[in-house]
Image: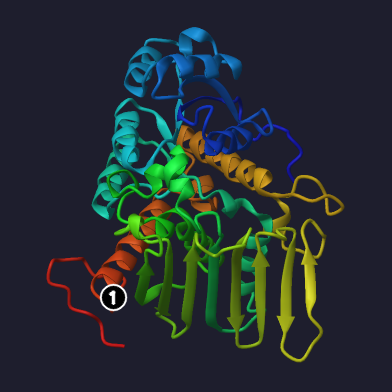
Amino acid sequence: MINGEKKIARPLRWAMVGGGRHGQVGYKHRIGALRDNTAFELVAGAFDIDPARGKDFGVNLGVSEDRCYPDYKTMFVEEAKREDGIEVISIATPNGTHYEICKAALEADLHVICEKPLFFTSEEVLEVKELAEEKGKIVGVTYGFSGNQLLLQMRAMIENGDIGEIRVVDLEYTHGFSATDSADKFSEAQKWRVDPKIAGPSFVLGDLSTHTYYMSQLIMPNMKIKKLLCDRQSFISSRAPLEDNANVLMHYENGAVGRLWTSSINAGCMDGHRIRIVGSKASLEWWDSKPNELRYEVQGEPIQTLIRAMPYLDDSCNADERLGALHQEGLSESWANIYLKFAIAIDAKNRGDEETLSNLVYPDINAGLDGVRWIENCVRSADNGAVWVGYNEVEDKTLSPVQN
């Protein structure tokens, strides 16, 4: 269990790029990083594109006024002059800025924690991965739901053979908050998400389904996609070419099949985030709306509901529990769990502890690369008429669809 005791020698000196007053995502980063007050210390930031507003916000967070910077470039230069300068940054800015900021941070010898999707193209990720390896730095990706403990229980049960051979993977991440175009007009956070110059080649595929896709790979690390087919729509026509609804069919290398539905126009839906894994003997199902429960359905037996933090769960699952089974945990604890693992990874990297790194399960740059490839393949399939495409094919301009 996690009880707040330090996992590393001292808190890492941490800064944020973005995550200012008017965006919800910045607060999620801060509650994750500062949950235990032993892994990170927020000492600097370039919180806003408006320098005065960013400084005012940073001071209200408790950051010294002279360490609230007008932009990230100035912050990297000035912090490098200090003996107590920053060691790691979090990037909580629109998608189109991630690559530039991440690369600049690594060149400034900083570790990086970045929002998803990591970049626009897998080529960009491969370039940054090489730079991170050269600099000896960690790049983590904030798949914020992936710290829910029962996902590790699913992973352990699958590895143990409790559900048999995986046959069907059923994934969903939907909501109804973009069922009209009102947010596109009035919400600054929504405006850039439907602008391909800033958001990249997708809307809900990148903004929503990369979470669920990564979680499925966390649960089933040995399940690799052989080919997929994506059909996407822009039901609010002004969002085209970016989609607000998509269905993805997947064929896995072991013969299993999968389906993912992602949508922001599922009118009336508050939380349609669900993962169901169907095996030859049993099925597992987890819902974000009930993150402390895991349904275990064995063919021919009564349905079981496994509860977070109970002693019958796998040690890997209970290692991350914080409050005991009597009390509910949720998204804030999930973010805290992945941020703690980021801190452990950074500390291990600094010490050259490759054994710890090799055994640590967290969303690293390889997870970010797979997420970008996921989007690329979905877009490639959809834009060529919803055709089957080989998952690991290198895209060229003369696509050869895979026959179903």
Residue 392 visible in the current orientation:
no
Q: Nearer the viewer, residue 161 or 245?
A: 245
In the rendering, at what x and y percent does residue 290 appear?
72, 61
**Above or below for 152 versus 337:** below
Residue name at image x 40 percent, y 60 percent: 236
Residue 150 visible in the current orientation:
yes
Which of the 4 image quarters holds residue 70?
top left
Q: Nearer the viewer, residue 207 or 169?
A: 207
Q: How is the image coloured?
A: rainbow
Q: Quadrant of the C terminus?
A: bottom left
Does 372 sit left or right of 174 as displayed?
left
**Above or below for 302 versus 94:** below
Residue positioned most to the bottom: 300
Residue positioned most to the top: 66
Secondary structure at numbered mark 1: strand
Residue name at image x 72 percent, y 76 percent: 296
Does 71 sit left or right of 334 as displayed?
left
Q: Amino acid at mark 1?
A: Gly
Which of the 4 image quarters holds residue 255?
bottom left
Residue with the mark numbered 1: 390
* Image label count: 1
In the rendering, at what x and y percent does residue 361 appear?
54, 53
Q: Nearer the viewer, residue 329 or 133?
A: 329
Check disc 1: other Cα within 10 Å, few if <14, some if 14-19, many if 20+: many
**Above or below for 342 versus 117:** above
Residue name at image x 56 percent, y 59 percent: 176
Residue name at image x 25 percent, y 45 percent: 127
**Above or below for 258 versus 132:** below
In the rendering, at what x and y percent does residue 200 appear?
31, 50
